[in-house]
Amino acid sequence: MRLRAEFTTEPFEGEGEPPAHAAVARDALRESGLEPDFGPLGTAISGDREAVLPALSAVLERALEAGADRITMQVSVDDTPLDG
């Protein structure tokens, strides 16, 4: 099963470099082998359930440790057809 997840970490810190809690969340995803769509208002990933769920656990843990005081997350089944 493929999943798609989108999340936002807070507090927002305006323009410039992303806050530490957002950067460590992005890095946790990359370290798990996923390539996030990282933007100023949130992050999105998609992948196999076996990769996504543990990666999201790492995101929660690391973002909170880095100063996030709220993480809003949505996870859904990704029913987009695969190419080929």
Image: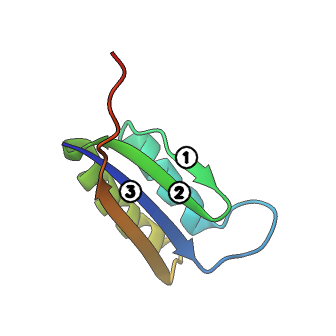
Residue 8 marker: none
Looking at marks 1 and 3 on the same chain, the residue that comes earlier in the sequence is marked by 3
Query: Which residue is the site of mark 1?
Result: 37
Which residue was labeled with disc 3?
A: 5
Can you give x and y, in whole percent of width and height, for residue 24 in the image? 52, 58
Q: CA distance from mark 1 to mark 2?
A: 6 Å
Give the spatial CA distance, label 3 vs label 2.
Answer: 8 Å
**C-alpha separation, residue under disc 1 versus residue under disc 3:** 10 Å
Tell me if label 3 and label 2 are in contact, CB under 8 Å: no
**Could you classify mark 3 by the number of other residues whose Cα lies within 10 Å: few (under 14), some (14-19), or many (20 or more)?**
some
- SS label for mark 1: strand
The structure residue drawn at horizontal position 61% and vertical position 80%, both measured from the top left corner, is 11
At label 2, the amino acid type is: Thr
Residue under the point 47% across and 68% down: 63
List x then y, in percent, for residue 20: 61, 65
Q: Nearer the viewer, residue 49 or 83?
A: 83
Rendered location of residue 83, percent (x, y): 37, 21
Of the numbered discs 1 and 2, the one sitting upstream in the chain is 1
What residue is shown with label 2? 43
Tell me what residue is drawn at x 36 percent, y 51 percent: 4
